[in-house]
Amino acid sequence: MFQQSDGHDGRVIIVSNRLPVVVRGDGDNLALLPAAGGLATGLRPLHETGDSIWIGWAGDLPTMPRATRKRVVRELQDRRIQPVELTRSQSHGYYNGVCNGVLWPLFHYQIDRIPLTVPEWEVYRSVNERFADAVVREYRDGDAIWIHDYHLLLVPGLVRDRLPDARIGFFLHIPFPACEIFRVAPWRREILAGMLGATVVGFHTPGYASQFEDAVRALTAFEVEPGRVTANARSVRVGAYPMGVDAAWFTAAAATEAVRMEREQLAGTSQQQLLLGIDRLDYTKGIPRRLLAYEQLLRDNPEIRGRVRLIQVAVPSRDTVPSYQKFRREIDEIVGRINGEHGTVDWTPIRYLHQSVSPTQLVALYGAADVMLVTPLCDGMNLVAKEFIASRADGDGVLLLSEFAGAAAQLPEAVSVNPYAIDEMAAAIKAALTMDVAERRRRMRALRARVAAEDITWWAASFMRDLRAERLDGRAADPAGESAAHRVALADVIADLEIPPVGIEHVKALEVLTDHVRRRVEAAAFQLRLD
Ligand code: GDG
């Protein structure tokens, strides 16, 4: 798929912390199962259909008996997966300590969750070096390297030191915060230098891209212009590439017999309306406030008790990180209280599943929901919102979407909510439950068109197109002839206006200005939606 989409021969080396599969069971019952989580779900179909190699951390591999370990490595290699092995202390310090103990809360504006004693950065650096070693070992001339996410912020720079001419892409799957927050990171300059080792640095939204540029401007001496940073005489492209989902897969899955049967079972004979939440159990996803808004809805509208229910799936996640264990107890308590206080002998307000569900169940749940609640406090993109839309081939269902999810910038027809305003959220849920069918369908039609057009293939193709278009000396090449075409068009306009002849430097300046204006307009449009 990489090849078909960008028409280039070289392979793509995908590099991410986790692999697209997890190893389950032991002995003869070992199985490689698809990993959950946004990054794995998004990139897996591209890897399965393209000429790529995937480098990532293989979890418990080093602790397995020798023969088992060998078998797993062979099976991984058959799937073009190259495991990076880490010792327990490496994975503990890097994954639990720095990645999920510090970087995750910091980039999601939750600085209060950063522990008083910051874990050792040395471990993070050395693990990033191990990943860089693995990339350099695999690399062949002509390959493009695509590094992902906050676990590997230093890898682009480390690879650049050893492969000065390589095409290196970096994509951040979480928000890039405002500079006032980012500068809290004790290793902020090293992080920026690491990311700027890439040829193209990508984010989900134009807002995150500008915030990254602000941080580079404030914390380094590098030259920054909209969409570009000149770092150590190398030009780095900075852009927004909103990640999509495999929309065709979800739409087709929704029409299968297995999903239809599952959906009918969920609907049962009840006339209740179904509210649905599906998230990793993470404090950024806004589950407690969502539950409180639902409670308020029940309290303010006693007539709807027994006529509505909420299914909340909270997939276990990072349960070895202390703040996640505490958070899990907090949710258990809220669910218990609401069910205890508002439930009756024949009605339970919330069905809470602390487990993952199968893909068939997932699509059936999306299809059965009257209102999908996606209310994160802060979220890079949020693929669940897009999967819900892609699964609604029936053209019905309402999406309630937090304005603080990256997806909000692309999905203005959703019902927008501020997840911190519980009253407002309760009122929005009620409005969604009572929205008339014509309005629901009008919104869903527009949402489906966008999610189908800007899907996972479109996302990967746009990123790879820009990565391939950069010249290896760091300046933009022009293989598609796009800017040439723009120049010709501009020359026509200028001729029509009878402006005296302009030089190439004027055209360049106009291009920069146009890009700048486009970004300002996008940011202003986004801000307007927030207001
Ligand atoms: C990060 C960023 C960004 C969830 N439960 C089950 C299940 N899932 C799948 C969903 C979806 C994925 O996991 C979750 O993706 P999100 O995008 O919602 O969230 P994160 O995991 O936090 O992902 C996020 C993403 O990276 C991509 O860049 O959008 O902002 O935080 O695909 O379907 N899948 C199955 N059973 C479950 O119970 N089968």
Image (tube, helix red, strand yellow):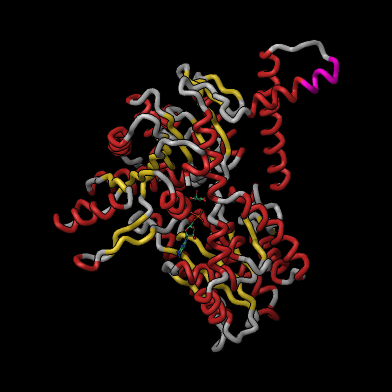
The one of 407 and 300 positioned closer to us in this rendering:
407
What segment is highlighted magenta in the picture? 492-498
Residue drawn at x 80%, y 19% is 494
The residue lying at 53 percent from left, 72 percent from top is 256
Taking 494 as reference, is 520 above or below it? below
Name the residue at 53% across, 79% down. Answer: 261
Q: Image height check: is 403 above or below 500?
A: below
Depth check: give the residue in front, 117 or 352: 352
Residue 207 shows in this picture: yes
Residue 439 at x, y = what percent?
77, 65
- Please give the count of numbered marks on the rendered protein: 0
328 sits left or right of 423 in the view:
left
Drawn side of residue 466 relative to residue 159, left or right: right
Was residue 496 drawn as part of the magenta stretch in this picture? yes
Magenta stretch containing residue 434, yes or no? no
Looking at this rendering, what residue extends furthest in the bottom direction? 345
Q: Nearer the viewer, residue 9 or 207?
A: 9
Give x and y (percent) for residue 359: 46, 67
Instruction: Tell me if 154 is positioned left or right of 112 in this view.
Output: left
The answer to whether any part of residue 189 appears in the image is: no
Residue in front for this viewpoint, 91 or 500: 500
> Is the stretch drawn in magenta largely helix, strand or loop?
helix
